[in-house]
Image (tube, rainbow, N blue to C red):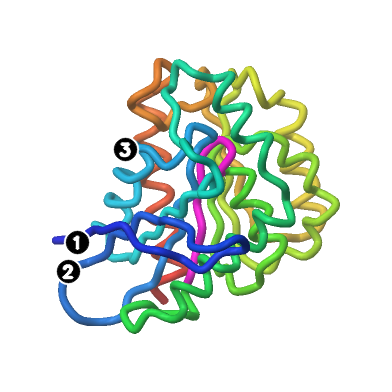
């Protein structure tokens, strides 16, 4: 599907937040997906994921949650800088900024405001989970290898949307027992949630710009994500 893209401004907690917008070309309303960045910032990879999502018939919006910083993008070989940026965020302002992102989408005449989902990677995976806990306007959530999701499970009873969660069993940042705890907790709460774990896959397996990229796992996850979004956002 032909798409267009541009940088836009979103009204967020502390002013205007830049965001990358990609959407199908032409007239009509489409469901939307918020694509949440990794700890490395709103970089070319995250923009490419948003463009891929738009190519499937969605309005994709990737917010720059580091908009308070002078330089909010660092390389994949700059992990200490990424950790510094990530730890500078607070959950209350994340929730507010994500609410602003949802509100921005709902105000656009080319968006189906009642069909908004979220996906995210690494830090963005945790933020996707947190947003599903806090914002009932989210109708589908698909976190990829979100670190510290286990620390949010006390908020999981508030989740109202279906979820699809991706992990690798060789993730040095997310122990397998934490993944098991996430799966068990969501099951006990009777949430509509599927947890997919890829054997041999490390953290960051979806990103083809990282050494941790695993093509087979990334391809399977993409197909599962497309099916999930179609089922819950295009109906």
Looking at this view, name the residue that lies furthest to the right.
Answer: 154
Secondary structure of residue under mark 3 = helix
Q: Earlier in the sequence, mark 2 or mark 3?
A: 2
Q: Which residue is mark 2?
A: 25
* Residue 22, quarter of the rendered image: bottom left
Looking at this view, name the residue that lies furthest to the front.
Answer: 70
Q: Earlier in the sequence, mark 1 or mark 2?
A: 1
User: Is residue 72 shown in magenta?
Assistant: no
Q: How far, Cα to Cα, is label 1 from label 2?
A: 6 Å
Q: Which residue is mark 1?
A: 4
* Residue 96, quarter of the rendered image: bottom right
Q: Where does residue 24 sit, x and y in percent of width and height?
A: 22, 66
Nearer to us in this view, 26 or 89: 89
Q: How far, Cα to Cα, is label 1 from label 3?
A: 16 Å
Q: What residue range appears in magenta?
A: 116-124
136, above or below 45, in the image:
below
Badge 1 vs badge 2, beta-carbon distance below 8 Å: yes
**Position of 168 compared to 51: left or right?**
right
Secondary structure of residue under mark 1 = strand
Secondary structure of residue under mark 2 = loop
Q: Where does residue 7 sit, x and y in percent of width and height?
A: 31, 57
On-image quarter of the C terminus: bottom left
Q: Earlier in the sequence, mark 1 or mark 3?
A: 1
Q: Which residue is mark 3?
A: 44
On-image quarter of the N terminus: bottom left
């Amino acid at each position: 599907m032909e798409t267009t893209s541009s940088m836009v401004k979103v009204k967020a907690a502390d002013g205007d937040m830049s965001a990358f917008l990609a959407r199908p070309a032409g007239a009509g309303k489409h469901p939307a997906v918020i694509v949440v960045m990794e700890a490395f910032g709103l970089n070319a990879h995250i923009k490419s994921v948003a463009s891929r999502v738009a190519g499937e018939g969605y309005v994709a919006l990737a917010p720059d949650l580091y908009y308070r910083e002078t330089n909010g993008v660092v390389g994949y070989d700059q992990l200490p800088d990424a950790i510094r940026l990530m730890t500078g965020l607070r959950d209350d302002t994340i929730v507010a900024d994500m609410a602003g992102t949802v509100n921005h989408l709902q105000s656009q005449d080319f968006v189906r405001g009642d069909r908004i989902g979220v996906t995210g990677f690494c830090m963005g995976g945790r933020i996707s989970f947190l947003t599903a806990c806090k914002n009932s306007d989210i109708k589908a959530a698909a976190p990829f290898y979100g670190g510290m999701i286990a620390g949010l499970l006390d908020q999981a009873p508030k989740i109202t949307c279906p979820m699809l969660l991706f992990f690798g069993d060789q993730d040095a940042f997310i122990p397998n027992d934490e993944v098991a705890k996430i799966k068990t907790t969501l099951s006990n709460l009777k949430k509509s949630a599927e947890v997919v774990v890829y054997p041999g896959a490390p953290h960051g397996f979806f990103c083809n710009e990282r050494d941790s990229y695993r093509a087979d796992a990334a391809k399977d996850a993409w197909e599962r994500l497309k099916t999930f979004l179609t089922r819950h956002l295009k109906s």
